[in-house]
Amino acid sequence: MNPARRPMIAGNWKMNAGGADGCDLATGVARVAAEHDSVDVLVAPPYTALAAVSHALSEDKSDLAVAAQNMHFEEAGAYTGEVSASMLKVAGASWVILGHSERRQLFGETDELVAQKMTAAFGAGLAPIVCIGELLEEREAGQTLAVVTRQLKAVLDELGGNPGLGVVAYEPVWAIGTGKVASPEDAQEVHAHIRGLLSEASADLGRDTRILYGGSMKGTNAEGLLGQADIDGGLIGGASLKADGFGKIIEVASKLAQQEKKD
Ligand code: 13P
């Protein structure tokens, strides 16, 4: 297995578990993750719980990584209600989710804005997880590959001299929170296309970038998806809110990684 593409299982808590419940959830996840060291596990609490979750994890001597769900691209200034990349770092985040479809759809984020945020994240030493994915009407119109190409090219064009892209998450919007998971074959087709675009940009990017799948992943459907050649992990919403359910996905990823080592 390419060590740069160790499986990653990331929990996006969205607007949930923003207080002491977040610390309990994170330490519960850390207990499961500690038993599966071939998987990188990451949790993304809301802003209000970032510092407390990071603190609880370091008290537990856990190496679970913490991500923010969004950020502003400016470093500081008159941007009421916003949070910058360096502030997230101070709160203990090492990753940041950018361009989630809920940000794009509900808060009007554009491809250009996502690219701007990615540059600011790199500047502050935060690793981005850049989300891309098509709407249901785009899939039905046969535009899936064109949409993800447009979204990915916008960030690739901004990469400049950066050696890596961080992580890409393919999240078909129609599969998010709907229980309608993409079939492993459909997801793999899009992941292979994304890897092709990364390889066109640079051979290293194509070889080493992890591409996560997101959209109604849970313990019972994770194996088919995570077993695909170009699916390197999952970005999980609803099923990341209970440590045992999220733990099941970590266990599946770990089992597949062990099998791959033996093959
Ligand atoms: P669900 O797992 O709830 O479908 O959410 C996926 C997601 O949006 C993760 O970022």
Image (cartoon, rainbow, N blue to C red):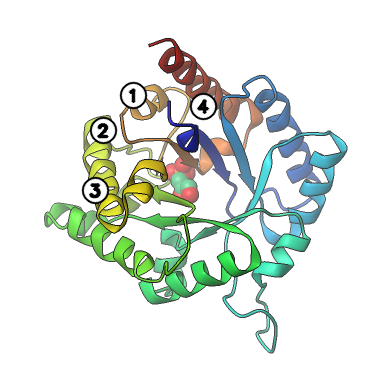
Residue matched to label 4: 249
Residue 85, image x, y percentages: 65, 68
| Distance from Cα at disc 3 to Cα at disc 2 | 20 Å
Which of pointers 3 and 2 lies earlier in the amino acid sequence?
2
Location of the N terminus by quadrant is: top left
Circles 4 and 1, Cβ within 8 Å, touching? The answer is: no
Disc 3 residue type? Answer: Gly
The answer to whether residue 171 shows anywhere in this view is no
Disc 3 secondary structure class: helix
Residue matched to label 3: 196
Q: Residues within 10 Å of mark 1 (few under 14, many from 20)?
A: few
Instruction: Give the mark count.
Output: 4
| Distance from Cα at disc 2 to Cα at disc 1 | 8 Å
Residue 221, image x, y percentages: 39, 26
Which of pointers 4 and 1 lies earlier in the amino acid sequence?
1
In the depicted structure, whether residue 39 falls above or below residue 237: above
Circles 4 and 3, Cβ within 8 Å, touching? The answer is: no
Mark 3 residue's CB less than 8 Å from ligand 1? no
Left of 37 or right of it: where is 256? left
Residue located 57% across and 65% down the image:
122
Left of 262 or right of it: where is 147? left
Q: Nearer the viewer, residue 75 or 101?
A: 75
Disc 1 residue type? Answer: Gly
Which of pointers 2 and 4 lies earlier in the amino acid sequence?
2
Figure quadrant of residue 243: top right
Q: Residue furthest left?
A: 142
Which of pointers 4 and 3 lies earlier in the amino acid sequence?
3
Residue matched to label 1: 224
| Distance from Cα at disc 4 to Cα at disc 1 | 11 Å
Circles 3 and 2, Cβ within 8 Å, touching? The answer is: no
Residue matched to label 2: 183
